[in-house]
Image: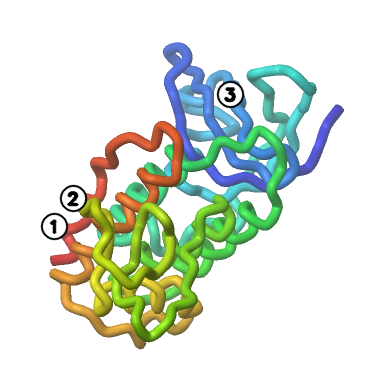
């Protein structure tokens, strides 16, 4: 049976000389793998440049329950990116976010709230003219709402540390190193709460931004099974410094 779905490209793997398997987060079926034959041929209907990191798709797909690899009947980019492929900083941010998303999302079933958040945030990021260096930090913290480990922002006056393992403010220094002091914790929560449209109002130094990014990745590692080490943020930090 054919289904119309929206998709977000997360990973493309070579299958043969001319074919690939692309892993796509879809609005109706969650994470799915699609075999696309002939994608590398000169006159291919579906081209490789349509399957880059976090490209947003409209697709007509064949879907069989309990099948590991599905097939695509039609595919087009919607919306077509205007800036991300042509801006090295935006491209680097998207590659980094793609890596984190791929390591974090395991859903085989549909989660339309998660899908809509990612789809709309990436579409918005493509539309904005200037790259805000807070975007990827805010994006990842907001994403935790949909992954089930969002930080508890409530605090008492005596709670001046944020325990990343527990995901909440505490009054005493934790016995481990995975925590934030009050200044960094307040920035952490501010990035979590501030709408993407207003993140340019959050002022912080590049040093603090790099520190918080490292702690956000620790937060993900602590709360996501088999998260592993992220590599692409090192290039990103260099470009944003």
**SS for dot 3:** strand
Q: Earlier in the sequence, mark 2 or mark 3?
A: 3
The residue pinned by badge 3 equals: 36
Q: Position of residue 96 (x, y in %)?
A: 33, 49
Q: Quick one: quadrant of the C terminus?
A: bottom left
**SS for dot 1:** helix
In the drawing, what numbered circle is on residue 104? none
The residue pinned by badge 2 equals: 235
In which image quadrant can residue 25 be found? top right
Point 26% across, 84% down: residue: 203
Point 39% across, 70% down: residue: 169
Q: Quick one: quadrant of the N terminus?
A: top right
Res. 106 visible in picture: yes
In the drawing, what numbered circle is on residue 238? 1
Could you tell me if the residues under marks 1 and 2 are in contact, i.e. CB atoms within 8 Å? yes
Q: Could you tell me how far apart the alpha carbons at marks 2 and 3 are, in whole angstroms? A: 31 Å
């Amino acid at each position: 049976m054919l289904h119309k779905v929206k998709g977000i490209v997360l990973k493309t793997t070579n299958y043969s000389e001319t074919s690939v398997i692309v892993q796509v987060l879809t609005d109706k079926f969650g994470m799915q793998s699609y075999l696309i034959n002939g994608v590398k041929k000169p006159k291919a209907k579906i081209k490789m440049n349509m399957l880059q990191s976090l490209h947003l798709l409209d697709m007509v797909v064949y879907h069989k329950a309990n099948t590991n690899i599905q097939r695509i009947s039609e595919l087009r980019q919607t919306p077509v990116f205007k800036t991300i492929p042509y801006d090295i900083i935006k491209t680097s941010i998207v590659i980094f976010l793609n890596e984190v998303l791929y390591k974090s999302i395991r859903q085989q079933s549909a989660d339309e709230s998660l899908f809509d958040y990612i789809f709309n945030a990436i579409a918005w990021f493509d539309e904005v003219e200037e790259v805000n260096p807070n975007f990827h930090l805010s994006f990842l913290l907001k994403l935790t709402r949909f992954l089930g480990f969002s930080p508890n922002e409530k605090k008492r006056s005596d709670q001046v540390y944020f325990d990343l393992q527990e995901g909440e403010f505490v009054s005493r220094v934790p016995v481990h190193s995975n925590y934030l002091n009050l200044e960094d914790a307040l920035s952490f929560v501010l990035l979590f709460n501030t709408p993407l449209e207003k993140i340019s109002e959050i002022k912080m130094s590049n040093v603090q931004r790099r520190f918080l990014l490292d702690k956000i990745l620790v937060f993900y590692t602590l709360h996501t099974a088999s998260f592993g080490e992220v590599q692409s943020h090192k290039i990103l930090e260099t470009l944003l410094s």
